[in-house]
Image (cartoon, rainbow, N blue to C red):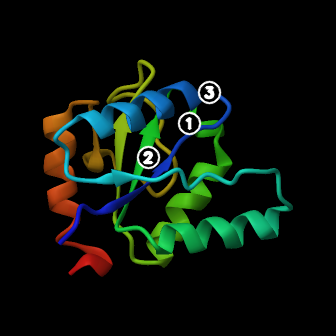
Amino acid sequence: MNNPRAFISFDFDHNSSEKIMFAGQAKNSKTPFNVDDWSSKSSLPQSQWEKLIEEKINKCNLVIVLVGKNIASATGVVKEISFANKCDVPVFGVYVDGAGGLSTLPSGLPRNRTISWDWEKIASAIKQVMKEGKNK
């Protein structure tokens, strides 16, 4: 199988720079996944945004949520996790921006599926989730 395609979910208002760094480092790491920029390129009415993002998530093998300190206010991230669950796309989180084990997680993202930003751990999480969901 080719490298799995990952949708990166993040708090646009607070963690855009971490998303850029994460995607850039992913290209230079030996971690077995591809990151495509699946973000909406323009401001859309809510219903159009939801339809577009759900379609993009459904084309992916996994969703990686970048969990920053302010993620609790990121309603779009909660919707993206919900779309992933609806589409049977597995999800895990990566702590960024000083967030950690005591940080608030978005609804639908379990604490035991959220890890530190460590490429070996990320590779292991990807291998695990590829055994789940629509990837079976």
Q: Is residue 15 visible?
A: no
Q: Which residue is mark 1?
A: 71
Mark 3 Cα shell of 10 Å, populated few (<14), some (14-19), many (≥20): some
Q: Are marks 3 and 1 in contact (CB under 8 Å)?
A: yes
Q: Quadrant of the C terminus?
A: bottom left
Q: Which mark is residue 14?
A: 3
Label 3, label 2: how far apart the Cα atoms are:
13 Å
Rendered location of residue 31, percent (x, y): 19, 44
Q: Quadrant of the N terminus?
A: bottom left
Tell me the kind of residue under disc 1.
Answer: Ile
Residue at image x 33%, y 53%?
34
Q: Which mark is residue 65?
A: 2
Tell me the kind of residue under disc 3.
Answer: His
Rendered view: 99 above or below 24? above
Mark 1: which secondary structure?
helix
Label 2, label 1: how far apart the Cα atoms are:
10 Å
